[in-house]
Amino acid sequence: MSTESLRIVWIYPDLLSTYGDRGNLLILAHRAAARGIPVETYEVRSDQQMPTTADVYLIGGGEDGPQAAAAQRLITDGGLHRAVNQGAAVLAICAGYQLFGHSFFAKGQKCAGLGLLDLYSDRGPTRAVGELRGDIDPRLGLPALTGFENHGGRTHLGPNATPLAKVTAGIGNGDQTEGAWAGKILGTYSHGPALARNPAIADLLLRWSTGADRLAPLDDAWAERLRGERLAAAASPA
Amino acid sequence: MTDGKLPLIAKVATTASKTAAALSRAAGRGDGSVIGGWIGLKIDPDLLAHLSSGRAVALVSGTNGKTTTTRFTAAAIGVLGRVATNSYGANMPTGHTSALAKEGHTPFAVLEVDEHYMAQVIEATRPRVVALLNLSRDQLDRAKEVAMMAQMWKTTLGQHPDIRVVANSDDPMVVWSASSSPQVTWFSAGQRWQDDSFVCPESGHPIERSGGDWWCTGCPLRRPKPQWSVEDEGVIDPRGDWHLVKLQLPGRVNIGNAATALAVAAEFGVRPIEALPRLARVTSIAGRYAQVERDGRNIRLLLAKNPASWLEAFDMAEQAPTLLSINARDPDGMDTSWLYDVDFSPLRDGRPVLITGDRAYDLAVRLQVNQVPFRHVQSFDEALASVPPGRLEVIANYTAFQDIRAELDRVN
């Protein structure tokens, strides 16, 4: 952490908050506070300047128009690039995940992305809608990924990004992989929201941003029940 | 047109439709409000147009409040004569066809229309008036994007300049949709949920709000001056007269729905003073707001389908034991992420909170983060047994609501 408290930025809730994306902010802040880590949260709207010194940046899902507007605005602003270069952690969901790549498609047009993840997205033959499940890259040491996906894109990773997970149910990136990670940036198609269904990912972001090797365990009985139910639901054909 | 003037195929289709609906009800399979229309339309694909011909039709659409506003509007226009209406919330062409077939010839029809079907239903029914309530997020995994829906409405209304549009001046998406129509009556019914209209649909610039007013910072789109508005417990009409609105349905949102109904009815020549006593007699609609006595508990049913309507339900619910039930079946939308768009903290007032439904675990995790204490119950009966005699508020989303309504013998 660069200051005494953990600073979390939610990027452009006015544009990218279609899929309960506030949930990721609430859960991350809740899990930090439960460990006694002081938290400051910032909801930065698209007409505001992007802070460059926060510890964690969250970006959510949204419709085509707002996605393209958010990418353009973030490129012009430049603050997020500086934050990432200074080592901030990022969780990017769905449309937010796509715009972290080199390019993506919105409203039938190819749009420039931030280029902070080595990947690009195009349109798939069908819309991917349903339960998503995957085995997360073992180097991250996390349990299975569970989420709900709803996107028309297919994402292709370059050599400098690693798939977040190997798909065991659902579509994800479209090539049996799902999401991507590089450094402290995580991208995924999972809604749910992702951190509600995958509290271990929230804790990974907290460890990355605080430098702590381990965090005190929390009572995750309800989250575990939810995970058990959704992982099983993804296994059976819809 | 009377039934006698219907084309033969429409007569056959109407009879088959009524029979199927009656069979469905007799078999206890449902209200019979969809199956009849489905069969009728199979026999005569133009049946809805045939049945609409000769009636003065009003359509009511929007994300929230459709069913209640339709019921209020039908009650108000009832001042003038018989009204056919789809009062069970079956709001697609099958439901419209069933409703018109069942009522036989009536001079008037008031139909609730699913937002997605507006173009098709306008073509078939040639309405005199279309009421647009609001547009917000609903059923994340399948509903059209809010902006796309607004565009669809705008295009359709632009093609039908003869239709009088009655539209909510407080919702920027609705105002933009109605802007293609040359004849709009504006009502102000408030907009509790603003997260889907931060950005102007015309220019993409931010929308500013202050008090009840709003305007786009990048183009001329702004809140039109409403002819009808809600003030205190009443409605102000276009002449500036204030009318007390006494309802049996709870909440400020229903005063807004009543204002909308009065505005629509006025386009047919009904005066508020004639309509208001009829609105006061509406008790519940397809179980919504219904109160049921069972085992000494007074159970009240509140339907909450999406973030905007959850906020309204919290506004109506008394500080009493509250059961929340969440499903994520097809009609509900299968993505439960929206639970995080709802702030459940109004329930953090010491009342016992019970949770149930197919997706109770999603709700459990949500409430934990929201610091709302709760208890999980496996069934509606277990919920009943675990609260003391007195009021039990039940707030449920669509299929969860239907499940509980079935437990209560399909209460209307």
Image (spheres, rainbow, N blue to C red):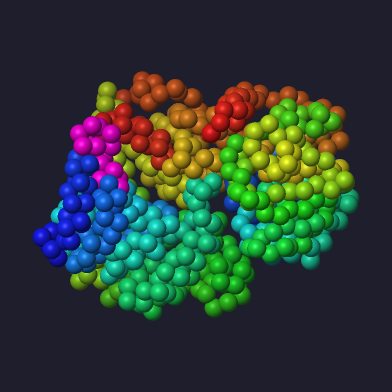
Q: How many marks?
A: 0
Residue sitting at 83 percent across and 41 percent down?
A: A162
Q: Position of residue B77 (x, y in %)?
A: 20, 62
Left or right of B121? Residue B210 is right
Quadrant containing the C terminus of chain B is top left
Left or right of B291? Residue A29 is right
Residue sitting at 61 percent across and 75 percent down?
A: B218
Q: Nearer the viewer, residue A13 or A183?
A: A183
Magenta residues, as a range?
B23-38
Residue sitting at 28 percent across and 60 percent down?
A: B46
Q: Quadrant of residue B289?
A: top left
Q: Quadrant of residue A113?
A: bottom right
Is residue B148 among the parts visible in the rendering?
yes
Tell me if residue B32 is in the magenta stretch. yes
Q: Position of residue B97 (x, y in %)?
A: 26, 53
Q: Position of residue B381 (x, y in %)?
A: 36, 22
Quadrant containing the N terminus of chain B is bottom left
Q: Nearer the viewer, residue B305 or B125?
A: B125
Q: Nearer the viewer, residue B148 or B283?
A: B148
Residue sitting at 61 percent across and 45 percent down?
A: A128
